[in-house]
Image: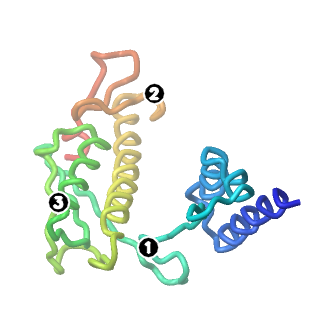
Amino acid sequence: MENEVMTDEVNQKIKYWTERKIRSCGLSDCVSKVTETTNWKQKRTNKQSKRGIGISCMCHETDDRASDGFYGTVAHVKLFEDGGIQVLIGEPEYGRGTHNVVAMVVAEELSVPMENVEVVAQDTDRVPWGWGALCPRILSQAVNAACLACQDTKKQILDIASEMLKVKPGNLEFKKGKVYVIDSPYHFINTPIIWA
């Protein structure tokens, strides 16, 4: 009977957490694994003096999923004829390396050296809106915005390159600042030519 109560207690906690819309992080799986590996049921059944075991969780959100308002970040990726890339993002750099990480993501997504990527600092005449330095949301929001902007940029580049190379976009790939026809290493176009 007591084992059923202990199992029911864990299940009630899992139900409470998942009803709070904490679904995206594997919380239920984590709690199940913890109760299994720590012999939680056995320890709760065979209680010892001055020994205890319990379960607790904490959540610290990095954006505002509860409101209907926009709490994200906007990023624009500009491509230049010399192969340079400029990222306009409204999030500040305040010593945590946010702009450096954004540059790394853009360089990897667009397959160019990181030194070709410039992340523009907060120039309110040029950069899009950003929520700002509120809680630890900047890195996740800025990186995701930059990544989405790069994916859109890549799609546009592949569409243009497919017309120039007379192949379908699905038959093209990015490598080292060039767009190649898959399985044809000598059939390529330098990306600066595409966006010139």
Along the viewing direction, whichever of 53 and 116 lies nearer the viewer: 53
Q: Inspect the image, locate mark 3, and give the three-letter code of the amino acid beneath it.
A: Val
Residue drawn at x 45%, y 35% as measured from the top left: 169
Q: How is the image coloured?
A: rainbow
Q: Residues within 10 Å of mark 1 (few under 14, many from 20)?
A: some
Placement of 165 over or under 43, stated as above or below: above
Q: Which mark is residue 63?
A: 1
- Among the 4 quarters of the image, the one containing residue 90: bottom left
On the rendered structure, is 128 left or right of 167?
left
N-terminal label among 2 and 1: 1
Tell which circle, 3 or 2, labels the residue nearer the N-terminal end.
3
Q: Verify CB contact (< 8 Å) between mark 3 and mark 2.
A: no
Q: Secondary structure at mark 2?
A: helix
**Cα distance, mark 3 to mark 2?**
31 Å
**Distance from the alpha carbon under mark 2 to that under mark 1:** 37 Å
Q: CA distance from mark 3 to mark 1?
A: 22 Å
- Horizontal and vertical percent position of residue 119: 17, 60
In the rendered structure, find residue 119 and report the number of the disc placed on it: 3
Amino acid at pointer 1: Asp
Q: Which residue is mark 2?
A: 171
Q: Is residue 107 left or right of residue 152?
A: left
How packed is label 2: few (under 14 Cα within 10 Å), some, or many (20 or more)?
A: few
Above-or-below relation of 55 to 82: below
In the displayed image of the protein, which residue is found farthest to the front?
Answer: 49
Where residue 72 sits, quadrant-wise, is: bottom left
Q: Which mark is residue 169?
A: none
Compared across the picture, whether 188 is left or right of 56 comes to left
Q: Looking at the figure, which quarter contains the N terminus? A: bottom right
Q: Residue furthest right?
A: 1
Is 76 left or right of 125, judged from the image as shown? right
Q: Percent x, y for residue 123?
A: 14, 76
Residue toward you, 140 or 144: 140
